[in-house]
Image (spheres, rainbow, N blue to C red):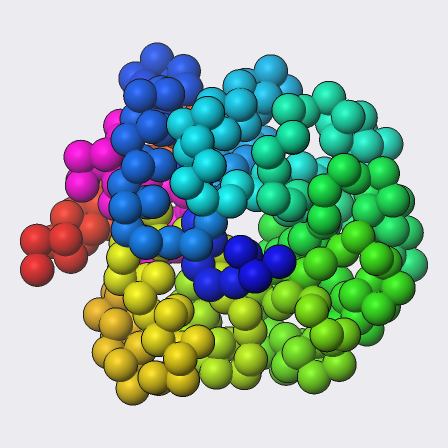
Amino acid sequence: MNQLIGTGVAIVTPFDQQKNIDFNALAKLIDYIIDGGVNYLVTLGTTGETPVLSTEEREEIVQFTFEHVAGRLPVVVGIGGNDTRHILHELERFPLDQAAAILSASPYYNKPSQEGLFQHYKTIAAHSPHPIIVYNVPGRTGRNIEASTSLRIAHEVENVIGIKEASGNLEQCMQILKKRPAGFMVMSGDDNLALPQMACGMDGIISVAANAFPREFSNMIDLCIQNRYSEARNINDQLMEAYDLMFAENNPAGIKAFLHEMGLIENELRLPLVPLSESIRQKVSDYLMK
């Protein structure tokens, strides 16, 4: 799956002022990101506010994304949750013919054991028409997928091709990298850690920041892949303040503020999420004026 090496972008879901999906803005954003030179797109990730989208809306977004991308880049589709049987139903229902892979966030709230996490992914992989990428994001789910479990999945479950690691735990990431089987991809899920994680041997990132800075971020990751870390560090240094502002209060409130200031989308979210506070939004504006 070399097509998923490098920079993937977890696309936001633009809303209009009535809180409806703004498909015109989504098309504009997709074009902007593709023109920035990224390697692939991820639709229906957490950054896309999937918890507040209906099943019908999510299906519409997937279909629209495939049609607008029109084969220009691979598209990964996010389908996860805390009900394994419901995920199997969505894998059958959603329009996934053109998907490069499925990104599946680990179960949230019900906090399964490590054995439960293994069986969850084993079951999904057995029923999925496309390869699965595990998504470990314990800050949102309340349960970490331990390195031993990730490695067990990697070695024992054939249809799982990689993991998006957003634990923020570098030691855990290094354990997975050290013992992973050949061909098993490990991607960063933390923009602010991408540079050191690439130095540890990761294969790329699924990024939030690259919604707003696709060219800069993908250039940085490409330089890391080429072992040109001094040049990559220069780019990362320029983006560090942006990372802090993006995640100061909430994702995707931060990245939506950036995209709004750049004229790409309305600064609209669905409750319970709200736009950035005015003090942080002003800092976003100031950053972009530099």
* Relative height, residue 257 to residue 136 (above, below): above
* Residue at 59 percent of width and 21 percent of height: 59
Of residues 57 and 185, the one nearer the viewer is: 185
Of residues 238 and 142, the one nearer the viewer is: 238
Of residues 226 and 285, the one nearer the viewer is: 226
Q: Position of residue 275 (x, y in %)?
A: 33, 36
Answer with the quarter of the image where residue 70 lies: top left
In reply to whether residue 273 is colored magenta, the answer given is no
Answer with the quarter of the image where residue 16 lies: top left
Q: Position of residue 28 (x, y in %)?
A: 28, 31
Of residues 214 and 70, the one nearer the viewer is: 70
Q: Position of residue 57 (x, y in %)?
A: 54, 18
Number of marks in the image? Answer: 0
Residue 167 seen in this snapshot = no
Q: In the displayed image of the protein, which residue is found farthest to the top? A: 18
The magenta-colored residue range is: 243-267
* Residue at 66 percent of width and 78 percent of height: 177
* Residue at 72 percent of width and 49 percent of height: 132
Residue 3 seen in this snapshot = yes
In reply to whether residue 253 is colored magenta, the answer given is yes
* Residue at 76 percent of width and 55 percent of height: 160
* Relative height, residue 131 to residue 181 (above, below): above
Q: Position of residue 211 (x, y in %)?
A: 34, 47
Q: Which quarter of the figure is the N terminus placed in?
A: bottom right
Q: Is residue 163 left or right of residue 74?
A: right
Q: Which quarter of the figure is the C terminus placed in?
A: bottom left
* Relative height, residue 251 to residue 242 (above, below): above
Q: In the displayed image of the protein, which residue is found farthest to the front? A: 71
